Amino acid sequence: MKFSQGLSARIAVAAAGSLVLAGAAGAAFAADPYGDENVDVNVEISPLVEPGSLSLTVAGTSSTLTEVASGDAELRQFDGELPVVTVTDTRTADEIGADRFWYVLGQSTDFVGSNGQPNISAGNLGWTPDLVDDAGDGLVILGDQVDTVEDTGPNAVGLVDQEFLYSAFDSAALVEAGGTSWSATAGLFLKTGIDVAPGSYQSTLTLSLFEDVYED
Amino acid sequence: MHKSASRSAHIVAWATMGLLALLSVFPANAATADDAADITWSVTPATEAGPDQRGVIQQELDPGATANDYFAVRNLSRIEVTFSLSAADGYYTDTGRFNMLPSDQESVDAGTWIELPDTVTVGPNETVVVPFTMTVPDDAIPGDHAAGIAASVLSTGTDAGGSSVGVESRVGFRVLTRVTGDIVPAVEVAQVETSYATSWNPFRPGAGSVTYEVRNTGNASVIVAGVVSAGTGSAEFPGADEPRQELLPGESRRFTTVVTDVWPTFIAPVSVALAPTAYDFGGDPVAIDPLVADATMWAIPIPQLIVLLGIGLILAAMFWGRRRSRRKLEAALAVAREEGMAAAMQTPATSSMVLGNHPTEESKDSS
């Protein structure tokens, strides 16, 4: 049998058309009847899992400094204790992801006199960070002791700015090591010259929890 | 109370009982009150639906553009807490950690571009999503501008007794905004200072301490790393247990790298070779030419010189000793010789005596 070119084309188009129709009919039969209100709705409700979080807990909101013997005739010293700070991480290592690390920083304002006496600089306040219940695995880094401007040495700058209380080197590694919370405190010490004006003073120490990400 | 107590024994007894009752109740109360009053919270970047995985917010905006975003404050305490919300300029501390200005310092840059509510009240174990807006001024300088957003709790209690420190605790995250335009990362190294710590064991090398300042002179945030070499030793910076060092535009930071295994060679060449990197917001590195700063370090081999001196002294002592003993020998020989000569001179006398005996014998003979 031999078809002309035109006929062959027509047959091909017709075949294609019937294929399209058959497809549409199949779809029509498979679909729910139009106008039927009874639609099955299937939904699977998984148990509610709160995502973990990295949180900060502070045990108190102020610290009082009381005078101690400074051991130096030229200095007066006042000691206190930072309220315990706790970082809790309930995230899984997967939730945290790679290359993240958290840290708690401390910075102080100047001490402002309550009766208009001159301020005492934040540089006169130092601290000695201390881990509470250190796991000893080296995954939590404790900040260096910061001395006051009345002291000498490389860290004799006071809690003016940059000082960190403690820090995770890698948030995920800490969680993988089995920990969930890490606490720290610090001994606070204010050192002034003996000519400091008597009276009460007030300063604010800002503690900040941040988590940063290595970009690479 | 003291006065009235001293007046009547009855009142003393009553007061003591009351005090005892107070003491026995107080510790238990204090413990539970403390726990219930503890405030625990977290702050993370979020979508309208809740916290997301971003950790930090990085965005690229045209001058004059506005972006809307969200963060979530989650209160994990047992009580409802009103947190104060703040946005402030961000910076990197001297130890290389991101921080934002405290509430008593005024922001001048990206911290002022963020608009957000002053406070948010969150019920116990609830999460509130807070919207915020970042509006870049029309005249913003192209490049990276850092800010932070935090939710904080501030103490209001004051103490009449002595000096007190109120503690403002905050949890926050970093918001880095890159204002579009020409991004030109640039870094310079300056003020290279060196010192040498001698090992007093002459068979051990000492350590060089190299301090230098790195300045970000461009308009992009730059991560600095490199190698510091001093004489026969070199060290990578930052070290394996130190955080990554990022410098925002305009920031400068002093670093000290300790290089071990440096033998004292009188003068040791020192070089700080930096390979800085900047990133575009797609995460691809933007090339910055590596740079090198050179210096020299005095490394006097004092223990080695002492050893040499010691050896020299011993040798000298030995030679001197030998010379002295030779001199002594010579002296002894001279003495011996003199004695010998003296003896030789005296020998005729002796023999004369011997000879002189003869007359006796002769006399004996004669007698």
Image (tube, helix red, strand yellow):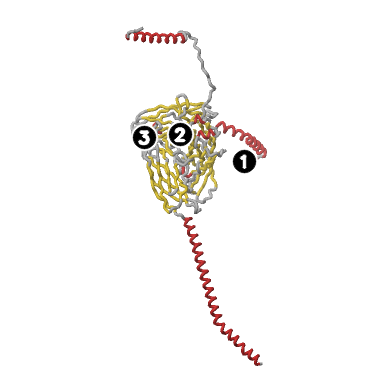
Can you identify the residue that label 2 sits on?
A213
Viewer-side label of 1, 3: 3
Task: Give the class, few, some or many, for how many residues have Cα within 10 Å of label 1's Cα (few <14, many ≥20).
Answer: few
Relative depth, front residue between A194 and B60: B60
Label 2: how many residues lie within 10 Å, few (<14), some (14-19) or many (20+)?
some
Q: Pinpoint residue B128: horizontal percent, then vertical percent.
A: 48, 26
Real-space Cα separation, disc 3 to disc 2, in angstroms: 20 Å
The one of B151 and B155 positioned closer to us in this rendering: B151
The first of marks 1 and 3 along the sequence is: 1
Which element type, helix, strand or loop, lies under badge 2?
Answer: strand
The kind of residue tagged 3 is Gly
Q: Position of residue B173 (x, y in %)?
A: 45, 32
Along the horizontal axis of the image, is A2 left or right of A48? left
- Distance in Å between CA atoms under marks 1 and 2: 64 Å
Q: Is residue A107 above or below residue B135?
A: below
Mark 3 highlights which residue?
Answer: B143
Q: Amino acid at mark 1?
A: Lys
In 3D space, how far apart are the residues under numbered discs 1 and 3 (Cα atoms)?
72 Å
